[in-house]
Amino acid sequence: MPLLRTTSENPDYQKLVVLLDATLKILDGDDHDFYDQYNKSDAIKNVVVFYNGNQPLGCGAFKFYENKTVEIKRMYVLPEYRGKGIAHQILTELEKWAKELAYNTCVLETGIKQVEAIGLYQKAGYAVIPNYGQYQGVENSVCMQKSI
């Protein structure tokens, strides 16, 4: 199976997150420092890495948000492998894992400029909600939610 459940200690996950952060720094522009403070991996215990053989192609994670809700974080697929359903498989596995741990809702935040990500989440059944928590009033954020 190409999906590995792991933690933020996984070296392949850590390498992918470095690439993700470099991409986000470009997309977020002047807002990068604001978003970056909420994307630290130290609080993340639930990580999924997608492999093709021994090569990690993508990752995603979730962390406790509140009550029976987790927050989807750190979704990334190498650019040359996008559009092949990898992100959807990672997201589905994260939702399955969260449900196994008795969570019933996923929330997430993505950037308004991340059109492909918004499309992925909408296709997976996520609906746009009012911005939550630290994203309230942030015009460049899109927050979404799904019952699992």
Image: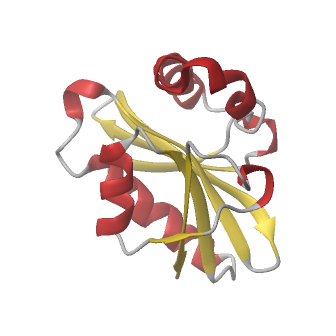
- As rendered, which of 9 and 75 lies closer to the eye? 75
Which residue: 35% across, 66% down? 122
Q: Nearer the viewer, residue 62 or 5?
A: 62
Q: Give the residue displayed 79% in from the left and 50% down from the top.
A: 134
Judge left or right: residue 144 versus residue 67: left
Location of residue 52 with respect to 84 vertically, above or below: above
Q: Position of residue 118 (x, y in %)?
A: 38, 54
Q: Is residue 92 above or below residue 138?
A: below
Image quarter of residue 9:
top right
Q: Position of residue 90 (x, y in %)?
A: 40, 54
Instruction: Name the colour scheme.
Output: secondary structure
Total count of labels: 0
Left or right, 52 with reference to 34:
left
Residue 22: percent from left, percent from top: 51, 16
Residue closest to the far left: 84
The answer to whether residue 87 is left or right of residue 5 is: left
Percent x, y of residue 31: 64, 26
Viewer-side residue, 71 vs 102: 71
**In which quadrant of the rendered view does residue 63 lie?**
bottom right
Q: Residue at coordinates 27% horizontally, 26% vertically from top-left? A: 79
